[in-house]
Amino acid sequence: MALVRTEGLVIKKFDYGETSLVVRFYTKDYGKINLIFKGIKSEPQKFFSSLEVFSYNEIIFYKNKNTSLHLASQCDLKENFDPIRNNLDKISFASVIMELLDVVMPLEDKNEEVFTLSFDSLKAICEYQYPDKIITIFKIKILSLCGFKPHLDSCIICQEKISSQARFSVNLGGLICSNCQKKDIKARPVYRGTVATILHIEKNNLANNLNLGINPQIKRELDYILDTFFEFHLEKKLKSEKLAIDLTGKI
């Protein structure tokens, strides 16, 4: 087994036997991985991190070629995001990021852009006044970066550019034109500004997107499209999404 070093965000953790934990990280160099921390419950001082969810850690582990469960050797806390932990609303938004990483990203598939987006989004939640806007941006960006995004450049059926009123089809995964709207009678009319906002967010980094003004009507439509898109294609509603709505009334 090779001994390797990386940086990672804690997605979740769960018990493994009486004294050990399995911790799922999203890492810079290896994507989503599962590490076993042997004996940590009986000897917590073995590692310089309490492995709290969405904490940022430097990790050294033995990478096993024959299984997706690897052995942790060292874990040092680098950032605990305390401003999030001290605010229940911010905890709910950070939890949405962690759950999306867990359900959208495959195991052991490196995507450094997704790692950077996730880390920067958590930092922004610490500092920014409107964390619900960060989550909307995060959803659009992670869909774009993992190749799972809705088709918005043209009609998903006929591939023609859409010059008139467009509709968004959750079932088909993109926009449909007026000529093709019979293909999905449940497709919802969508504002041009909503489509333009998604395309802008896809092409720009988080810092630039935080300066983007989004009027409340377009924000509501964005959230509806994103939430129904995730729910349809993941075949479940995000648990953290419901928590964020219950606590804040937003998203």
Image: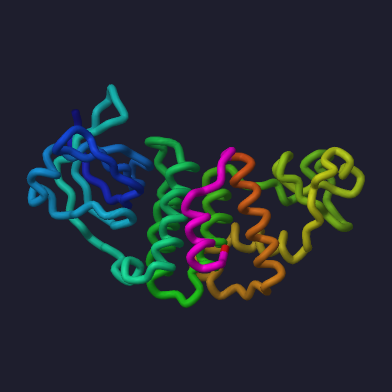
Q: Is residue 23 above or below residue 9?
A: above
Q: Quadrant of the N terminus?
A: top left
The quadrant holding residue 70 is top left
The quadrant holding residue 157 is top right
- Residue 28 in sight: no
Q: Position of residue 199 (x, y in %)?
A: 66, 59
Q: Residue furthest right?
A: 179
Q: Is residue 69 left or right of residue 150?
A: left
Q: Which residue occupies 31% across, 29% down?
A: 68
Q: Is residue 82 above or below residue 178?
A: below
Choose between 68 and 37: the one closer to the eye: 37
Q: Position of residue 136 (x, y in %)?
A: 56, 61
Q: Position of residue 204 (x, y in %)?
A: 56, 63
Choose between 42 and 78: the one closer to the eye: 42
The quadrant holding residue 86 is bottom left
Bounds of the magenta segment: 234-250
Q: Which residue occupies 30% across, 37% down?
A: 34
Q: Position of residue 19 (x, y in %)?
A: 14, 38
- Residue 115 in sight: yes
Main SS category, magenta section: helix
